[in-house]
């Protein structure tokens, strides 16, 4: 990540915008640089506005996998890149073993969100198949 981008984030006016920007830059650099199809990040609810500002015009989609009063788990992805990966037969086969049907991220997101939410609310097993989406 270019140092200029990090410096720009450090100069943000508010603590929330600074924290959200740095979280995005540091933890999703491969996604931002088109080296990776997706990532998952945790944000404070008050940081979401800044996150949306940072993502505007990047082509990166944002879906909430879980939210509670203070924080959110967001799934960030480049739809076309991720769909190309998910269209592979072996990936579809693997995900079908966990109950996922279809071949696109739009097909898979509802179940992924339910499984992540169930984990956070009930303390059950984390949906390890999430690795296939990352």
Image (cartoon, rainbow, N blue to C red):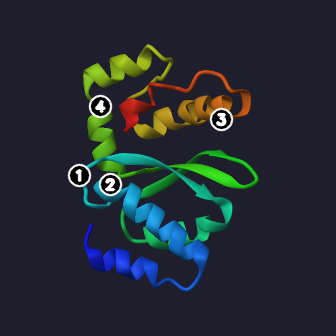
At label 4, counting other C-alpha atoms closer than 10 Å, the crowd grade (few under 14, some 14-19, many 20 or more) is some
Which mark identifies residue 87? Answer: 4
Evaluate if marks 2 and 4 touch, with contact meaning CB atoms under 8 Å apart: no
Which of the two labelled residues, at mark 1 and mark 4, occupies the earlier sequence position? 1
Q: Nearer the viewer, residue 7 or 120?
A: 7
Residue 97: x and y in percent read 44, 13
Q: Is residue 115 left or right of residue 36?
A: right
Task: Identify the residue at image location x=63%, y=32%.
Answer: 114
Which of the two labelled residues, at mark 1 and mark 3, occupies the earlier sequence position? 1
The residue that mark 3 highlights is 117
Which of the two labelled residues, at mark 2 and mark 4, occupies the earlier sequence position? 2
Task: Identify the residue at image location x=65%, y=22%.
Answer: 124
* Element assignment for label 1: loop
The residue that mark 2 highlights is 31
Q: Is residue 49 left or right of residue 133?
A: right
Residue 61: x and y in percent read 44, 56
Marks 1 and 4, how far apart at CA: 18 Å
* Element assignment for label 3: helix
* Element assignment for label 2: helix
Marks 4 and 3, how far apart at CA: 25 Å
- Closer mark to the observer between disc 1 and disc 4: 1
């Amino acid at each position: 990540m270019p140092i200029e981008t990090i410096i720009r984030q450090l100069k943000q006016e508010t603590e929330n915008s600074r924290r959200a920007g740095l979280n995005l830059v540091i933890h999703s650099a491969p996604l931002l640089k088109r080296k990776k199809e997706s990532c998952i990040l945790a944000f404070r609810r008050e940081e979401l506005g800044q996150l949306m500002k940072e993502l505007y015009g990047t082509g990166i989609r944002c879906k909430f996998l879980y939210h509670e009063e203070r924080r959110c788990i967001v799934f960030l992805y480049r739809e076309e890149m991720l769909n190309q990966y998910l269209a592979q037969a072996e990936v579809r086969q693997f995900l079908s073993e966990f109950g996922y049907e279809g071949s696109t991220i739009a097909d898979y997101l509802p179940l992924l969100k339910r499984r992540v939410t169930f984990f956070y609310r009930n303390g059950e097993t984390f949906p390890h198949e999430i690795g296939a989406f990352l």
